[in-house]
Amino acid sequence: MNFCPNCGKEINQGASVCLSCGHAVNQENVQAIIQPRGKGLATISVVFGSLGFYPLIFIGSIVGIITGIVGINDKKNMYIGRSKIGLWLSVGSFSFWLVIIVIAALSSL
C-alpha cells in the first residue's frame, strides 16, 4: 500500500496525484512513507478509559492504562496524542472509583 506524503491517505500504485488532497506525488516520496500505525491501540485506550467511569469500572480503567502506556512507548505510533488522552482518561476513571470507595468506607464507620 502507498500513502500520500501530504495527507497520509492511501493512493493507488503509480498515481501521480493524490485523489484526496490533490498533492502531486512522485513514486520516490510514496515509497518512503511509513504506514500509519497505532490508531487502534490509541482508540482502545480512549474507549476503555471512558468506559471505566461507569459500565466497566476498574476493568476498563486498567485496560485503558495498559493500552495507553503501550501506545505512548511505541516509537512508530503516529497517534501518541490519542494514547496520552486515553491514559489520562483511564487514570482519571480509576482514581474516581478509588475516591468513591474510600468515601463509602469512611461513611460506613
Image (cartoon, rainbow, N blue to C red):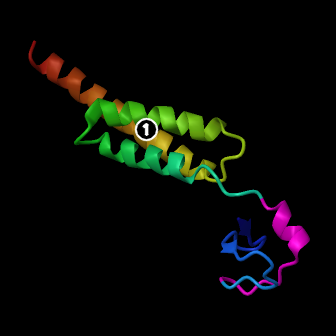
Q: Name the residue under label 1.
A: 64
Where are the magenta residues, as a range? 20-33
Q: Which of 85 and 109 is in front in this view?
A: 85
At 69% from the left and 69% from the top, the residue drawn is 8
Residue closest to the far top: 109
What secondary structure is marked by label 1? Answer: helix
In the picture, the quarter occupied by the C terminus is: top left
Q: Position of residue 5 (x, y in %)?
A: 78, 70
Residue 7 image offset from top left, x and y in percent: 70, 73
Q: Which residue is farthest front?
A: 13
Residue 40 seen in render:
yes
Q: Which amino acid does label 1 sit on?
A: Gly
Residue 26 occupies quadrant: bottom right
**Which residue occupies 78% across, 82% down?**
15
Where residue 58 appears, as percent x and y from the top left, is: 30, 30
Question: Would residue 98 be found to the left or right of residue 89 on screen?
Answer: left
Residue 62: image quadrant is top left
